[in-house]
Amino acid sequence: MKLLIDDANLDAIKDIVSLYPVDGVTTNPTILSKAGENPKDRLLKIRDLIGSDLDLHCQVVASKKEEIIAQARKLVKLLGANTYIKIPASGEGFKAIEELTKEGIKITATGIYSPLQAFLAAKAGAKYLAPYVNRIDNLGYDGLAVTRKIQNILEANDFEAQILAASFKNSNQVLDLAERGVGALTLSPDVFKGLVNDRNVDFAIKTFEDDFGRILGEGQTFSDIL
Ligand code: G3P
């Protein structure tokens, strides 16, 4: 399972990448607008920061097929290998996904609220499908159940597409999909940090250090004797 950062703040990305095993960054127009910088410049900075080996997902801002396709081609040219173009899974998005996939451009179908949206995007050739777990919950439905249903559809049809679940607000939502083994999750920096946020863990680590210090002297570790 891949783990990505759903953010465009450079300090936050640097911080998370330095602490956690991370496979890339996802953005959307809202996330980029929060960065308060020309989106092209910010995307280039993110690519520079994470390097060419990590995945970078960038969303088109268009609803007509031809415009979606034109933006997708330019974004891939700009951001290089391991770039995924996010296309909303509705309207003319499906046809654009089909055509771009034939050109070898990797697509993440986004804005997914229902299993059938995901089915159509997978059939069109998307590499990833992004259900919005928490936003679905906020509508009074069950975001995790929708995501599990999408996983069933992928398995039943032998689709190549994988789930890239998005819109998380708590660790329990992440845990459920980690157990299920979906393809990828993208988390905001806050949710990332909340995954292991436990005073018992901090206490255990501190106790190990204190106990070790009793042999060699307070604050002494292997670094002082090896
Ligand atoms: O790209 C979609 C995802 O970022 C949505 O997350 O937290 O705005 O619901 P959120």
Image (cartoon, grey):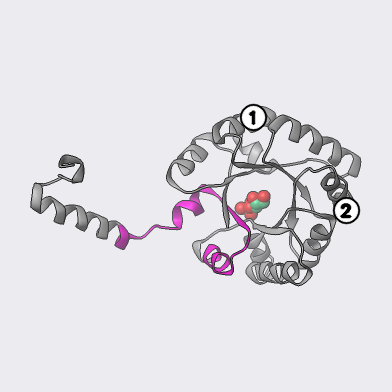
Q: Is residue 77 left or right of residue 184?
A: right
Q: Is residue 33 left or right of residue 17?
A: right
Q: Amino acid at mark 2?
A: Gly
Residue 141 shows in this picture: no
Residue positioned 74% across, 55% down in the render: 111
Please state the extent of the stretch shown in magenta in the rendering: 173-201
User: Which quadrant would residue 81 be assigned to in this image?
Assistant: top right
The residue closer to the viewer here, 50 or 9, is 50
Q: Is residue 132 left or right of residue 95?
A: left
Q: Secondary structure at mark 1?
A: helix
| Percent of width and height locating residue 4 | 57, 49
| Percent of width and height locating residue 85 | 74, 43
Alpha-carbon neighbours of circle 2 within 10 Å: few (<14), some, or many (≥20)?
A: few
Q: Which mark is residue 138?
A: none
Mark 2 CB near ligand 1 (8 Å cut): no
User: Which quadrant would residue 72 be assigned to in this image?
Assistant: top right
Q: Amino acid at mark 1?
A: Leu
Which corner quadrant holds the C terminus?
top left
Disc 1 vs disc 2: which is toward the camera?
1
Is 42 above or below relative to 25? above
Residue positioned 55% across, 58% down in the render: 169
Tell me the residue that label 2 is attached to.
91
Tell me the residue that label 1 is attached to.
44
Which corner quadrant holds the N terminus?
bottom right
